[in-house]
Amino acid sequence: DLKDNNLQLNANSNEQNLGMMSSRSGDVERRVTALSALRSSGADASLLLPTNYYGPSNQTQQKRRHFISKLLSRHVPDAPSGRLSSLLQQSVKWQCHTGAFPAVQKLFQDLVENENDDDGGGKKKKKKRKSPEQKFDLVLGNVDLVGSSDNKKHKRKSSSTKDGVIVERIPSRAKQTIRLGKKSYIESAIFLPDGSGLITGSSDGFIEVWGERTRSGDNESSLNSLLQNDIDFEKLRTSDLQYQKNDELMMQDSSILAMGISHDGTMLASASSYGDVCVWKIADGRLLRKLERTHGGSGSNDRGCAVTCIQFSPDGSKVLTGGHDSTCREHGLLSSKMIKEFRGHKSYINCCSYVVLPNSSIVTRSESNGERNFLAVVTASADGSVMIWNCRSAEPLREIIPPISTSSNRSIHDTESIFSNRSIHTVIHLHSPPNTMIVVPRSDRAFMMSLSGSILQTYVRDDVQDTELLAATVSPSNQWLYISANDGKCIVFDLNSGKVEKILTSFTQECVGKSNTNCEISGILHHPHFSFIGGYSNDKSQKRGMLSIWK
């Protein structure tokens, strides 16, 4: 009986549910039919909606939308027109800085052709034409020639083309020479980011900006003047730097051993042999900050350890320095105090730099705090090692010791060896291939290495053996590697193949003078856009310091 009662109750409930569903569906159908009838009759749309549907006081749809947009405008910022394009430009600049692709500027070069003129008895008439435009392909990652159907006719004199890609020309001879006063020599030098000038730091503490424009009326932002040799690097820049015109030069109390320029090109940081760091505004020569004895020293008569390398942080708010106290330090420009110290090397720090690292085998996700890219510090020392540090925690991530050999072709890895025989003086970060660097020790060979420590390429001379490499630089496109040796020559390597492409036999002789045959090159630098290189020596035996620019 209980089972029968339960079955009967279930049947009754099902019938009730079906009845409710049928009544609801019928109600919906009736409403839809009524609405369609009103729409077909052309009635006002407001009659189809219940009272106060858009708000109190029977607001209209437009008034309600205006009210909601007014409330949202207080919390949602109004982006100006063109904001997206400016953000894209900033992202491209950041990727250029991090090495995702090189910053290649497009330009037109006016080439000059001499043609015989029948009028005037055999005089020659100059005719100008434009060479093809250079553009950087973001997808393919190379520089193409655009707008030229005849490569032979529209071929740049400063470069050659191969498969439509510009091949950088290698400088062949010295064109201009910067000469300092007697008993003064160049300790450091750096090109301005736009390539319109060159800054030198001398042994007497003076900081000078060279590169005077020889022709007036040209657009200063145009790069054609550089190609047409309209900038004279032998003269001080006084046309737009009034303080140099008034002989009010930037100066420190001791030798300027290192310099660095902010990424926007407005500030200059200089480091002296007394350990002082000064930050200048290049436009007016004003001293913005002075950090005294950044690497030790406490008393008023106590001199700090010499600072041998310096670089601005990507945002320009900090400077990174390395010194003779075997440490690398980061200093805040707002507080004028040391923020972090990177300690772990056993000898002098020769170079230091910031680098953006991706999450890979070099760092774990916990070390980068889950970030896709994070900022790291790379240092190279006279103890023969390269160290990569976490910039946030100042902890070492990896120590790289390349297989450096001495003149006796013996690999050095023991701690009892002399540091000077295995000193790493140059580390250059490359944008192509990505996450790689050039490591140049004072040895007979240089290396292309990954940030994990593996050797990708070795650069060795094939003409002589047992020479020492003194200084190095890389072309802007990462195609050529220039290394000066102690035999007075500059060797140009193909960065990808490792082969010797050219040897500049009289490089040291032109850079230090014919009378100073025993001097060694202490620094070599490359123009940021074109095939200009410069070399100088800080040898004290020089009668006067020189810096020669090769084109």
Image (tube, rainbow, N blue to C red):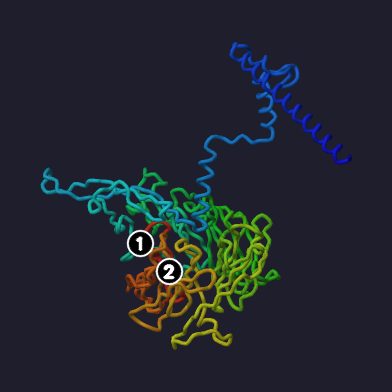
Q: Nearer the viewer, residue 514 or 168?
A: 168
State the SS at label 2. strand
User: Number of numbered discs present?
Assistant: 2
State the SS at label 1. strand
The kind of residue tagged 1 is Gln
Question: Residue 147 in the image: x percent, y percent?
Answer: 30, 46
Residue furthest right in the image:
1
Residue at image coords 58%, 87%: 416
Which of pointers 1 and 2 lies earlier in the amino acid sequence? 1
Q: Nearer the viewer, residue 482 or 372?
A: 372
Disc 2 designates what residue? 536
Question: Residue 263 in the image: x percent, y percent?
Answer: 53, 54
In which image quadrant can residue 87 be found? Answer: top right
User: Quick check: 194 left or right of 293?
Assistant: left
Question: Residue 280 in the image: x percent, y percent?
Answer: 56, 55
Specify the quadrant that holds the N terminus: top right
Disc 1 designates what residue? 176
Residue 230 seen from this side: yes
